[in-house]
Amino acid sequence: MGIQKEQVVAKALELLDETGLDGLTMRRLADALEVKAASLYWHFASKQVLLDAMADALVAEVAVQPTTAAQSWRERLMAVAVEMRGALQSRRDGARVFAGTYVTMPNVMRVGEMMMAPLREAGADTRLASWGAFSVLYFVLGFVMEESGLAPDAIPAAELEQRTTSFLVHALTMFPHLHAARQDIFNPDFDSRFQFGLDLMLDGLAARLNPSR
Amino acid sequence: MGIQKEQVVAKALELLDETGLDGLTMRRLADALEVKAASLYWHFASKQVLLDAMADALVAEVAVQPTTAAQSWRERLMAVAVEMRGALQSRRDGARVFAGTYVTMPNVMRVGEMMMAPLREAGADTRLASWGAFSVLYFVLGFVMEESGLAPDAIPAAELEQRTTSFLVHALTMFPHLHAARQDIFNPDFDSRFQFGLDLMLDGLAARLNPSR
DNA sequence: ACCTGAACACCGTTCAAGT
DNA sequence: ACCTGAACACCGTTCAAGT
């Protein structure tokens, strides 16, 4: 009967959680599928093609919630951004897998479309809507890369503490603003920090949607 | 006499331009330095440590231009963001090298400090200044990752064309907003697109610095 | 159509041994 | 203090051969 593409991608994402991106090899994946490594090349031209498919599958989990008429464009766009962050965080190294990818994959396009829609309906022209949507996507990606780089399974606790100490020593002697803000910089409430950055962009978009005010 | 850390990092960045991140191996780097691969481990505990040093060296090129009193906080923050984009683009796969890194490296801290300074002097509290600065950094990183993924030396022209076609086919049949905005989405004026996204965030920051208006 | 055996040309990393 | 030889335990990928 053999293996199917979708099974391979699903198993690869499963394995990703266990091994991380650096530990995910074609041989290990083949083992998990009870097949030989060479077989994978019948279904995927290269490891990169498989990684692209994984990225697409990751983003496929960004659910389209039925639009409530009561929701503002801002709430709707925010919801997609939050979902996107969740998708990138749903698997270990998810952001890194996605980062090697381009916006031309169907499910990434779908997310772009879902971000553009509320902007368009609120009166944005194609440039404002598309550049705005992609700008939000770039922020989300950058945020999650940093955020998940600090996750406990990505970095040993001892090393994190060492980095923290090193940061504080440098800050104290050379970077007064970082030192003054150390409480905020090490604030572990990533939800609030994400919301904060998102709001900055949404405010900028709002100003362009209502240039009169 | 032997090799020095700085020479190794400099040569590694040089080689990065030739080979790309995937082609940069310890053995090739050793060859370029006319040394054996094992010797590198005397200076760097692992390849990852070397990559961290490369990321730091990349960001070291973000120059501090002497602040002109005439410049607004907005101009100063923008200038650092533009410099940061330039640094990440100065080497092939620069953004990918940097993306594996954390904000605890001295030169990354320096950039954070340079972004925070104008905000603080404009009256921002530590939270607004630090979270704002890092939000801008996340946008810059996400932007350059996408931007340089589309660069001619990162992707063969034939494949880029194929992706474009695939995008348009999908857009036509499934994603009306993307299709309507296709001219803007494929607009190659990345400077303008970068400026656009940056302005969104800066507007958001401006609103928080002058909440009275 | 789909899988395997076997090989090719590499990797990162370690470590005893050299100078 | 710094480098090398030689090895270990892997990689991604190809391809003739099998069913």
Image (cartoon, coloured by chain):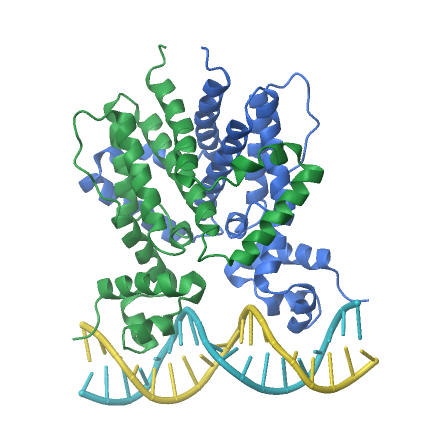
Chain colours: A blue, B green, C cyan, D yellow
Q: Is residue A194 left or right of residue D13?
A: left
Q: Is residue A164 above or below residue B57?
A: above
Inspect this view and state whether residue A181 appears: no
Q: Position of residue B22 (x, y in %)?
A: 45, 63
* Residue sitting at x 29%, y 42%: B83
Q: Give whichever of A23, B189 is nearer the camera.
A: B189
Q: Position of residue A6 (x, y in %)?
A: 72, 55
Q: Position of residue D5 (x, y in %)?
A: 33, 88
Q: Quadrant of the N terminus of chain B?
A: bottom left
Q: Position of residue B31 (x, y in %)?
A: 32, 76
Q: Is residue C13 above or below residue B168?
A: below
Q: Is residue A23 above or below residue A178?
A: below
Q: Give whichever of A188, B47 is nearer the camera.
A: B47
Q: Give whichever of D10, B165 is nearer the camera.
A: B165
Give the quarter of the image for residue A64. top right
* Residue sitting at x 66%, y 36%: B175
The tally of labels here is 0
Q: Quadrant of the C terminus of chain B?
A: top left
* Residue sitting at x 59%, y 45%: A90
Inspect this view and state whether residue A38 appears: yes
Give the quarter of the image for residue A118. top right
Q: Give whichever of B81, B121 is nearer the camera.
A: B81
* Residue sitting at x 31%, y 48%: B87
Give the quarter of the image for residue A53. bottom right
